[in-house]
Amino acid sequence: MRNIFSILLISFAAVSFTCCSQEHLIFMKNLRNIKLLNLKDILDESGLSGKKSRQAQELPGESKPGISNENIIKSNVESYNKELIIPSDKDFSISIKLSNDFVVLKSVQGDSVYMKDSSRQANGLFLFHSGAKDSKIKFQDFDVNGDLLKNINYYVKIKVPAVTLPQQMSSTAAGASSSAASASQAAVTSGITGSMTDTNAQGKSNIDISPAIISSVEGLSPTQALHELSRMLASPDIADNEKEMIRYRMADIMIGQRSFGDADKVINDMQDQYKKAFYTGRSLLEHKDYRNALRHYLDSLGGDDPTRKQAILDMERLVLSIGAAEKDLIERLKSETIKYKSDKEFYVSSMLSIARIYQYLPDIYSAREIYESIINGDYSREQMEKAEQAYDQLKKDFLEYR
């Protein structure tokens, strides 16, 4: 009865306040389809009843129209950004720490080149070759269920060297060692744990990735570089010959940081007896134990060419540090240096040091002979200028002194 009265009341109001237009006729025809709200419905719709809104009642798995669950998940994935400082036209590696995750190389933007055949993707070790411009390398880390855990972005900054390093210092593929003064050189990685057992044994034996491993820590602080190299050294996925190269780099950094106790442990594990003698000599040199350092350096002269060259340069530094030397030692250093005359960078650096040593003997005329041979020889402008400066100082201090 109450509903009938309501319908009649609405009908009367509609007829009273309109002129029976087309819209009003449609309204009147559809009165029977109107669902009237009672007081409870009005309170529920207004929110005054305390009932949760429809949005709050939606199930967790439901999504609003136009918004996919996939987009919501992706927005919650964290991204990690890292920066590498790498010289141009060099091999370098990026190693990602693995547990049970699966790392995928998503993209390479820029002119860095991915060296797929040399990489060990199952172990999280990816090798690249830098170009002339900066690059961005993106990885994605998935769990065993295929869910995306995080994005990892590496921004590769190309470093242009201010000076050209001597050949014996830059030839890492041949097993050369950097000097203690260059111990801070090094670029970055997340490390490698070796927890994966699916190792490509054939790839390990045929591919020497040690130069890329060494270059991967360039740009890091000495502490960070040692941390990353230690992780690689402990990995079962790194070959023994590659671990030997890692030990050389670690010894360089440790000696440069005067961490002699740690350096001695690394040196004792070296397999090459001549390298072991060389690094023992270098450690003793920094200790200022010149006598024993010289003895070990002389023992290292039986090693490969890079070891011999660096030992010669270090012995010359030793003699210049103490300001005295026996003539037999100087002649030995000179004869060893002449063997590598075709390596002009090394030859000039060594002979200039020998000329300065001659001045301590004193043997001024032997020093002058060396300077003049370089000034009049076929060497770079920079090398000749160094000889000219040293020769001018010699003339000022001795030859033209009055």
Image: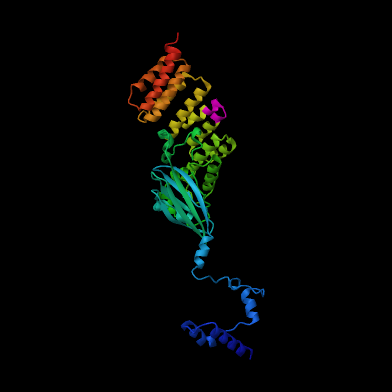
Q: Could you say which quadrant of the image residue 121 lies in? A: bottom left
Q: Residue furthest top?
A: 402
Along the viewing direction, whichever of 180 and 361 lies nearer the viewer: 180
Does residue 303 appear anywhere in the picture? no
Q: Position of residue 147 (x, y in %)?
A: 51, 63
What colour scheme has been applied to the protein in the rendered image? rainbow
**Residue in view at x 43 percent, y 20 percent:** 355
Along the viewing direction, whichever of 56 and 21 lies nearer the viewer: 21
Q: Main secondary structure of the magenta part?
A: helix
Question: In the rendered structure, which segment of residues is drawn in magenta?
Answer: 284-293
Q: Residue furthest bottom?
A: 1
Q: Is residue 61 left or right of residue 341?
A: right
Q: Quadrant of the N terminus?
A: bottom right
Q: Is residue 63 left or right of residue 348?
A: right
Q: Position of residue 148 (x, y in %)?
A: 51, 61
Asked if 304 appears above or below 361 in the picture, the reply is below
